[in-house]
Amino acid sequence: MRQITEEQVQNILDMELVLPVIKEAYEDCVEGKIYAGNRTFMPIRGEKNVGQWLVANCTNKPFFGSKFSSVFPGNLKKDLPSTISKISLYSAETGELQALIDANYLTAIKTGGSAAIATDLMGREDANKLGIIGSGLQSFSQVLAIQEIRPIEELYVYDIDPGRVENFIERIEKIKNRPYKIIAAKTADECVLSSDIICTCTTSHIPVFKGNSVKPGTHINAIGSFTSFMQEIDTETVLKSDKVITEHVEGLWEAAGDILIPFEQGKITKDKVSGTVGDVLTGKIPKRENEQEITLYESVGSGVLDIALSIAVYNKLVKDVK
């Protein structure tokens, strides 16, 4: 059994590797070559702290696996990451544990890569202004990925803590792939109004911007809400969205408060959700059809993508050793 560290994962997972692996995993999922099991999440001593378990199984590769993530927002005050993840990768032939993988970076880079693919499918071709709400590792990975699929000219960043924004901008300056401007937005609504592509990457339980700030033609990546009681995106934004896609429709109806709350209020029906990223990739449902559509990618996490990237990391390490 291998123990794979965060440093090893970071050395392997660049966007050149990540984006094709995620795209293939989505296509394999539609074809039934890899599939997710039921998720489990559990509030830990109150709703703000949550433990979540995701599982996935391959039929075309000799692996299955599980990921555990804890989300403790108060960790930021303790100089710890708010999200901590571990992946267990098992042999599908013997059931033996093959690798235990530190997965904070893998989780973030997976989420960023998936949002980039969703943005490429649903965002306007001329979209070049990116808005990020939040300033943690997930936010960093959104920029890292989306700058690869759109020629960003302006990046707007907002966080409730201005000090974290300054540190975030310093990090982005070192990895940006073109000389785009980076602007610290004064409010979340200013960030939204200024942007063609929005990414919300917070652990907030209440909406972080007002739906009337969203312009026609905007694409939104909603990353933060992954439990039934979290609502990072307000109901008005959901109602305004012409297309809503996700990783797994079943998982969305289990865990996406952004969608579940307006559904339970009777303001939307299940038809509001168009389908999955894989459905768009394989042509089962249409991608963006005009320049005025507002599109929403509601991310709730995907064991399929976690395990696909874990297999890529494991195989690369085994190959390098040989």
Image (cartoon, rainbow, N blue to C red):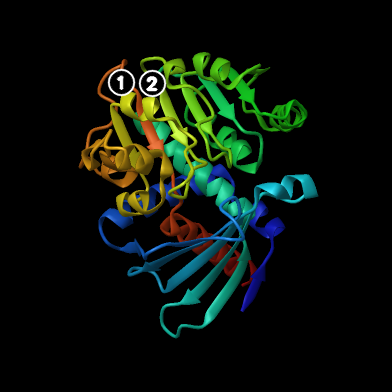
The residue lying toward the viewer, choosing from 188 and 4, is 188
Left or right of 115 in this view: 83 = right
Residue that numbered label 2 is attached to: 125
Query: In the figure, residue 37 lies in which quadrant?
Result: bottom left
Query: What percent of the width, then of the height, locates residue 40?
Result: 45, 63
Classify mark 1: residues with Cα within 10 Å, few (<14), some (14-19) or many (20+): many
The quadrant of the rendering that contains the N terminus is bottom right
Residue 47 higher or lower than 199, as above or below: below
Labels 2 and 1 touching (C-beta < 8 A): no
Query: In the figure, residue 93 lies in which quadrant?
Result: bottom left
Q: Amino acid at mark 2?
A: Glu
Query: What percent of the width, then of the height, locates residue 186?
Result: 66, 16
What residue is rendered at 31% in x and 51% in y?
27
What residue is rendered at 42% in x and 32% in y?
119
What residue is rendered at 58% in x and 47% in y?
108
Left or right of 224 in this view: 121 = left
Residue that numbered label 1 is attached to: 293
Residue 224 higher or lower than 104, as above or below: above
Left or right of 72 in this view: 312 = left
Q: Amino acid at mark 1?
A: Glu
